[in-house]
């Protein structure tokens, strides 16, 4: 293994027996033992389903990971992305040595601190302070080293009032705050963080991302799993995309994320509901949402950057004279907000109402977008909202001079007057 490579994963697979702990039966254990004694391959590693949770089980065995290989260099920040059930958490458990691979090998250099789930590594009967020293000791640090970092950990976690209270009385947010503070400040060579940060509030998540960036800048390695593509994009230099337990892509973060979004997020150009099934409440209900492209050529079916289109919404107002306005939020699929626009507040009659937002051609960049709809009363209080109501992709129109690749930025205005003086 090269000197600067701290994690080397070679053809790693992990198999589980469905509905059982271990192999399930004594006969299976004996067959495995007999194969091992004769230096033969485990007979149960020749069978097993692909890790697709939506399929009906047709075998007693499933592959959580299958033939995964990648290297991580010292100081790298690696983001692991993929749908739920893709094998991300299993990979982190293997890297953290919580479990071992069924096939393949992993070579890891350096101390590892892992934050895989709420309460990882904490004893519920011990106080926050005692757990800090316990975790530090597990990482191989001396009492003096832990003591030098203790005040910094408590300050970062913001739990000073409860530091001498048993952690079983902590909220999930307090658990995560202290656990992350311990993992990040006790100077492991490799920091592994799962989606557990989603438990914290927005301010704490921002604080954690900043701390991980600081950790990476000091030459330590970070493995980060998240469904927040914006966080992965801002923090990680490289990304690993897992699909059904296998490597679908590995490389530069931007390219891997774009590949993931294009393959996993499906277009949803319209949604229609009856009054009985419409989402909403006793004040408002959303009846429909639709993207209406204005193609210059009737044979054209792809929404590209040159195509203008309308976003049309219909809703039902149940309260006579209720002052309501619509607010639309356009985000990229990775979580970047492009704009937030609202209609003027207007007192509406009881019944159906519609709103249309016109998007001109040559305005949006080639990207995958989501639309969220808010129905707001008096321009201040939200009556009802739906996130990711519509999802659509804008593709790049054919260009003669495409030598510079993807047009960067959120929007792409075409008029730029320039005069030599």
Image (tube, helix red, strand yellow):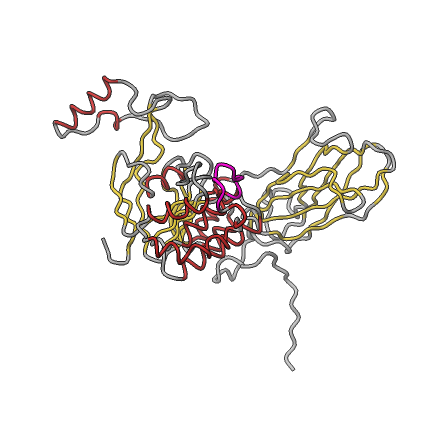
| Residue beneath the point at 81% across and 45% down | 378
Residue 262 visible (yes or no): no
- Residue 12 horizontal/vertical position (percent): 29, 39
Outermost residue toward the bottom in this view: 421
Of the 4 image quadrants, the one containing the C terminus is bottom right
Taking depth in this image into account, of 20 and 275 the one nearest to the observer is 20
Whether 313 is drawn above or below 253: the answer is: above
Q: Residue at x 36, y 40 (%)?
A: 91
Asked if residue 164 is positioned above or below residue 351 in the image, the reply reads below
Which residue is outermost to the front?
164
Q: Position of residue 96 (x, y in %)?
A: 34, 43
Estimate the x, y position of residue 123 in percent, counting from the top left: 41, 38
Residue 377 is at least partly visible in this image: yes
Residue 388 vs residue 321: left or right? left
The count of marks equals 0
Please check the rendered image and state whether residue 166 is part of the magenta-colored stretch, yes or no.
yes
Pick the front one: 378 or 314: 378
Instruction: Determine the residue positioned at 19% across, 29% down.
Output: 41
Q: Range of the magenta residues?
A: 164-174
139 vs 70, nearest the viewer:
139
- Can you name the residue that lies furthest to the left here? 38
Which residue is rendered at x = 24% and y = 56% of the image? 2
Residue placed most toward the observer, 252 or 210: 210
Q: In this image, 399 relative to 223: left or right?
A: right
Q: Is residue 329 left or right of residue 5?
A: right
Is residue 85 rendered magenta in the image? no
């Amino acid at each position: 293994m090269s000197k600067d490579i701290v994690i080397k994963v070679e053809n790693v697979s992990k198999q589980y027996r469905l509905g059982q702990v271990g192999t399930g039966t004594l006969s299976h254990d004996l067959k495995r033992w007999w194969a091992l004694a004769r230096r033969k391959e485990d007979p149960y590693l020749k069978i097993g389903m692909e890790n697709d949770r939506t399929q009906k089980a047709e075998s007693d065995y499933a592959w959580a990971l299958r033939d995964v290989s990648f290297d991580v260099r010292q100081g790298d920040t690696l983001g692991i992305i993929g749908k739920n059930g893709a094998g991300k958490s299993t990979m982190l458990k293997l890297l953290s040595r919580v479990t071992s691979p069924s096939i393949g090998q992993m070579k890891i250099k350096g101390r590892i601190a892992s934050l895989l789930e709420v309460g990882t590594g904490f004893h519920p009967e011990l106080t926050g302070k005692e757990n800090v020293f316990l975790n530090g000791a597990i990482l191989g640090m001396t009492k003096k080293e832990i003591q030098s970092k203790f005040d910094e950990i408590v300050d970062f976690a913001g739990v000073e009032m409860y530091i001498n209270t048993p952690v079983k009385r902590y909220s999930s947010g307090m658990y995560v705050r202290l656990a992350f503070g311990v993992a990040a400040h006790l100077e492991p060579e490799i920091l592994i963080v799962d989606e557990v940060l989603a438990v914290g509030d927005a301010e704490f998540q921002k604080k954690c991302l900043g701390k991980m960036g600081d950790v990476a800048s000091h030459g330590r390695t970070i493995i980060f799993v998240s469904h927040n593509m914006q966080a992965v994009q801002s923090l990680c230099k490289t990304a690993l995309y897992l699909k059904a337990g296998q490597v679908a892509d590995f490389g530069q973060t931007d390219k891997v994320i774009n590949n993931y979004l294009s393959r996993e997020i499906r277009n949803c150009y319209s949604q229609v509901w009856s009054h009985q099934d419409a989402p909403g409440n006793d004040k408002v209900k959303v009846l429909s949402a639709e993207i209406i492209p204005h193609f210059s050529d009737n044979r054209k079916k792809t929404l590209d950057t040159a195509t203008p289109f309308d976003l049309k919404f219909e809703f039902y107002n149940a309260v006579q004279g209720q002052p309501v306005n619509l607010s639309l939020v356009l985000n990229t699929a990775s979580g970047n907000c492009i704009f937030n626009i609202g209609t003027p507040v207007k007192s509406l009659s009881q019944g159906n109402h519609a709103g249309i937002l016109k998007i001109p051609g040559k305005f949006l960049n080639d990207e995958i977008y989501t639309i969220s709809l808010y129905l707001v009363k008096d321009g201040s209080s939200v009556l009802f909202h739906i996130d990711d109501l519509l999802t659509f992709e804008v593709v790049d129109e054919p260009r003669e001079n495409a030598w510079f690749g993807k047009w960067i930025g959120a929007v792409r205005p075409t008029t730029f007057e320039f005069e030599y003086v």
